[in-house]
Image (cartoon, rainbow, N blue to C red):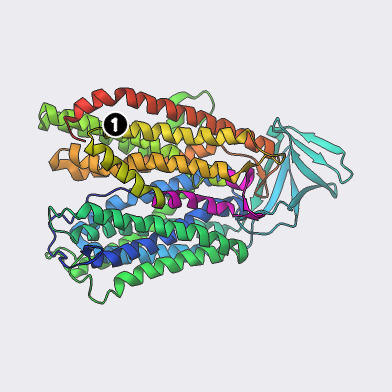
Amino acid sequence: MRLNNPVTAGDEPAAVASDPAWFGHPRQLARLFTTEMWERFGYYGMRALLTLYLTKHFLFSDRTTNGIYGGFTAMVYLTPLVGGLLADRYLGAKRSVKFGALVMALGYFVLCFGGEAAQPWAKIDGVRHTVVQEHVVDRPTSDGQEKRYVVIDRQRLAIHGQADGSIALVAGDGHVVRQVAADRFQSGGDRSSLTTVLVLLAISLITVGNGFFKPNISTMVGELYRPGDTRKDAGFTIFYMGINLGALLSQVLCPILADVVGWWAGFLLAAIGMLVSWALIHFDGGRLAQFGNPPADQPNARALPIFVGALVAVPLVMLLFQNLMSAAPAVPGSGVLGYVLALPLMGKLLFGTFLIAVPAILGYAWTSGNREEFQMMVAAMVLITFNTVFWTLFEQAGSSLTLFADRNTDLTIIGGWAMPAAQTQFFNSFFIITLAPLISALWIWLGRRGIEPSTPVKFGLALAGVGAGFLFLVWGAGHADSAFKVSVWWLAGLYLIHTIAELCISPVGLSMITKLSLARIVGLMMGVWFLSIAVAQYVAGAIAQVASVDTVGGEVTNPKLSLDTYVHVFTTIGWVAVGIGALLLLLAWPIRRLMHAVN
């Protein structure tokens, strides 16, 4: 969860709340806090289910699922750049938030219409065969009783994955009828083209709606405070606790409903949360009348064309996702050029824009600023790059770590009660809420003694920490049971370490950007910051694709091979992260010099 204090457009508001009636803050903060909480309730409740929904209900491969998920979360951080600009110039923050809330709610409602589950099939030597399922329930959590058979010459053969990736087809009496090499076995699912279009429509609606909501609710919080009001940072800290509170509640409740009632019920609860968020802004009883209004020189007539244009953009976003799904991987041995050419359109846009923006902005700083300003901009770009690496690895939570929780984790908590795999993402929210005050107090205590770590050191510790979290889980994999499942407490330990790492980097990131940037292009630098996070989300999906495991009917055929695959990927990215963190710690002193005492 992000705990950043964003730059807002409210530094010089037209109206400022001056009645400190809620924990020493303007009373309107309570309504905005609750609005954000319910919006995040909807978003994180949906996100907890999305990866499992795509792999189990639609029977998309891990590669396709993780690609969609990475592209979706990348767009979630890219669209606010446009939504914030439209709000600042034309709509005002309040109308943007209300419109975004309705569009996102519509997206969650559309997710409820998934239709019948996809029907699995298997191809052996290019010949397609029917896959018969027994005791399979279309729910997020598998009970281990499911059975799947491939039908060949009217004989039902159990599908057993082997350590080398091959498939053994086993008859009812236990003997192996046929051994199939990995490259000669392919599985998939027949799914309704209509429901496939609907799920892409849903995530496109959520993407567009989020672009209007995400940046502008923060803008309204900023408007509550006069310039120089020392309560502002504390107000944003309270406000952003709403993110984690909403996420905590939804990541517990939505998976339970999806398991007990059906996928649609979990998504419906997310939609209801989103509608509550909209209602809190729309029916505000005049409490927010002075805040989030459009510029005085912009007529209301401009709103309708913008809203229509946003809805017209939804099919364009759908095309990006369709292109993402259909993109083939680069041919082995084709090199960097082959990899770049094989990138889907979304990847080319993200990487191309980032690679152009960074040197262009540094060139501008070189020509228009003095030597000190240029060096500070260089420091900012270096830290942005390392921040991108952090979020690339941290954001495995909704993709590979969720699939690991479903496939290779013993989710028993206590007394035989097991939590759903989709609920495991709640650990991060829980640890944020409990640890954020303690970490904040630690920085204050160290600061008073003059030994608080500098920003580069905090970034380095965060990167090493995210790597340590993966290595902790790998250690736990060495204690897997006979079913090749790791205790859920090892996964909880990973989230604990990752949360501590997050608290070393997230609260200081945007503040660092505002302090190091040239004043005349701070808005542009904020755009680069969010663009870098969008790139990180996209690459996170690509890394999760490396951890892809072959499945039949949404379930792995060999739990040992699945565990070995995850352990290999988590070990690699764990040590890489530790190494990059160590490198940044070594570079902390020269970067600190480039920052010219800014911390």
Identified at 54% across, 47% down, the residue is 402
Q: Position of residue 359 (x, y in %)?
A: 24, 30
Nearer to me, 538 or 408? 408
Q: Horizontally, is 246 left or right of 194 in the view? A: left
Range drawn in magenta: 404-433
- Placement of the C terminus among the 4 image quadrants: top left
User: Is label 1 in a helix, a strand or a loop?
Assistant: helix
Horizontal side of residue 490 vs 93, given as left or right: right
* Rendered residue at 24%/23% (across/down): 590
**Which residue is the site of mark 1?**
456
Q: In the image, residue 65 lies at what x, y percent?
A: 54, 46
Quadrant hosting residue 532: top left
Residue 213: percent from the left, percent from the top? 32, 59
Q: Quadrant of residue 530?
A: top left
Q: Which of the 4 image quadrants contains residue 210?
A: bottom left
- Horizontal and vertical percent for residue 478? 63, 32
The reply to whether residue 61 is in sight is no
- Residue 1 belongs to magenta span: no
State the predominant SS element of the stretch in magenta. Answer: helix
Residue nearest the observer in this picture, 363 or 213:
213
Task: Give the residue type that dot 1 points to.
Answer: Pro
